[in-house]
C-alpha cells in the first residue's frame, strides 16, 4: 500500500505554435520554489522545445521521435517509474505534449490504477492561438481532441484579435467543450494560479450541463441525452467502454450523471481518452441533472439513444 503523497501532475497541450512552451515557462517561474520536474515530448528525433524551457525545474526528461500517448507509452511509463523511485521525488510534474498529441489518450495513462497510486492528474491545460485556432481546426482533427480533453483552455495572443471575434471564439470553444474553464492570456502569462487539486464533481459546469444538441462546425457535435430512470451500472459501463473502443475516432468525450439501480446518490460518468470511469458522488443542496453529454465528430443522437436504451432498468425495478 502506497502511503506517500501523490505527485500533482499537469498536462500542457495545444497545436504547434500555440505558445505551450512560453506558457510552461511562466508556470515554472511562478512555481520556482518547488521541486518541479518536466517531461517534454516532440514529434521528431531532434529536440527543440527542451532547449527553450528555462531552468526553473529540477529535472527535464525528453521523449522524442513519436507521440507521447502512443508509440512512446512504454518510455513514458519508464520515466514515471523513475520519478516514483527517485530519492527526491518531485513536488510537481509538468508534461508538455507534442503539438499533435492526443491529450485524451495521454490523460488516460493517469487513470490506470498503477499510475493513479502515485500520480494525481490535477489539470489538462490546452493552449490555443487566438489568431489561428479556428482555421487550424478545419485542417487538423487532433486540435478537437486537445480542446475536448481540456479542463482549462488558455486563449493565447488574445490581444492580437478584435474583441468581437474573441467573443465568438469563446462561444465556439464552449460549444466544443462545455466543461472547460476558458481564460484569455497574453504571451502565455497566467494572471491566475495553478489549481492545487482536481476540480470537484459538483462544479457549476456539471450542474448546468447543456440540454440540447449543439453543432460546433466540421461535423463536431455535443449531444445531451436525459436519463431520468435508473440504469444497470455494469451494463452501462460495458456499453460505453465498447463504444469508446469501437468508435474512438468519433466519440471524443462522455460526461454526465446517471442514477444507478439500488443506489441513493447519482454517479458521475466520464471518459478520459478511451477509458471510462463511474464514481458515486454526494451533493449538498441541488442535485445534478441526470443527463449524459457525448462530444465527437459525426455522432448521431439515434445511435446514442439505442445504446442507452439497452441499459435501462425495467419499470418498477431499482
Image (cartoon, helix red, strand yellow):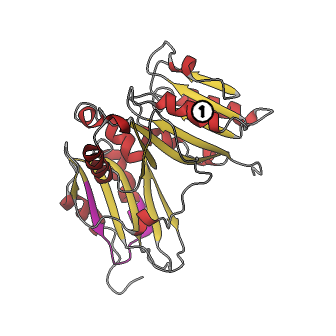
Residue for point 27% across, 69% down: 309
* Residue 62 x %, y %: 57, 22
Q: Is residue 270 or residue 170 the one in the foreground?
A: 170
Q: In which quarter of the image is residue 130?
A: top left
Figure disc tally: 1
Between 313 and 154, which is closer to the camera in this rendering? 154
On screen, residue 241 versus residue 111, left or right, reads: left
Relative to residue 191, is residue 35 depicted above or below?
above
- Above or below residue 317? Residue 248 is above
Q: Name the residue under label 1.
A: 77
Tell me if residue 234 is in the magenta stretch: yes
Q: Which residue lies furthest to the bottom in this view?
A: 316
Residue 7 or residue 184, whichever sits in front: 184
Up/down of 294 relative to 99, above or below: below
Q: Give the percent coordinates (x, y) of residue 278.
A: 48, 62
Which residue shows up at 37% across the image and 68% down it?
208
Is residue 273 among what the camera can see? no
Quarter of the image with the C terminus is bottom left
Q: What stretch is highlighted in magenta?
A: 222-237
Considering the numbered disc 1 on the image, is that residue within a helix, a strand or a loop? Answer: helix
**Residue 252 percent coordinates (x, y):** 34, 47
Amino acid at each position: 500500500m502506497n502511503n506517500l503523497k501523490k505527485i500533482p501532475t499537469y498536462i500542457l497541450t495545444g497545436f504547434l505554435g500555440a505558445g505551450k512552451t512560453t506558457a510552461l515557462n511562466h508556470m515554472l517561474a511562478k512555481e520556482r520554489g518547488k521541486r518541479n520536474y518536466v517531461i517534454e515530448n516532440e514529434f521528431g528525433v531532434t529536440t527543440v522545445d527542451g532547449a527553450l524551457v528555462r531552468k526553473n525545474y529540477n529535472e527535464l526528461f525528453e521523449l522524442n521521435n513519436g507521440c507521447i500517448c502512443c508509440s512512446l507509452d512504454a518510455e513514458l511509463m519508464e520515466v514515471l517509474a523513475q520519478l516514483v523511485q527517485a530519492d527526491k521525488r518531485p513536488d510537481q510534474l509538468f508534461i508538455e505534449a507534442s503539438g499533435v498529441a492526443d491529450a485524451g489518450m495521454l490523460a488516460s495513462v493517469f487513470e490506470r490504477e498503477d499510475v493513479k497510486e502515485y500520480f494525481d492528474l490535477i489539470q489538462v491545460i490546452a493552449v490555443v492561438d487566438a489568431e489561428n485556432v479556428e482555421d487550424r481546426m478545419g485542417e487538423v482533427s487532433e486540435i478537437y481532441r486537445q480542446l475536448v480533453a481540456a479542463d482549462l483552455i488558455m486563449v493565447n495572443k488574445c490581444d492580437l484579435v478584435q474583441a468581437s471575434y474573441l467573443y465568438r471564439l469563446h462561444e465556439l470553444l464552449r460549444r466544443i467543450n462545455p466543461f472547460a474553464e476558458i481564460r484569455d492570456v497574453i504571451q502565455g502569462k497566467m494572471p491566475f494560479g495553478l489549481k492545487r487539486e482536481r476540480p470537484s464533481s459538483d462544479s457549476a459546469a456539471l450542474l448546468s450541463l447543456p440540454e440540447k444538441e449543439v453543432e460546433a462546425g466540421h461535423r463536431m457535435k455535443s449531444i445531451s441525452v436525459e436519463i431520468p430512470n435508473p440504469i444497470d451500472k455494469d451494463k452501462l459501463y460495458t456499453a460505453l467502454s465498447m463504444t469508446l473502443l469501437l468508435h474512438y475516432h468519433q466519440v471524443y468525450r462522455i460526461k454526465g450523471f446517471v442514477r444507478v439501480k439500488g443506489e441513493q446518490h447519482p454517479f458521475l460518468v466520464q471518459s478520459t481518452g478511451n477509458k471510462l470511469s463511474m464514481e458515486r458522488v454526494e451533493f449538498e443542496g441541488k442535485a445534478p441533472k441526470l443527463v449524459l453529454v457525448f462530444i465527437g465528430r459525426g455522432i448521431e443522437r439515434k445511435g446514442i439513444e439505442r445504446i442507452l436504451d439497452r441499459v435501462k432498468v425495467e419499470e418498477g425495478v431499482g
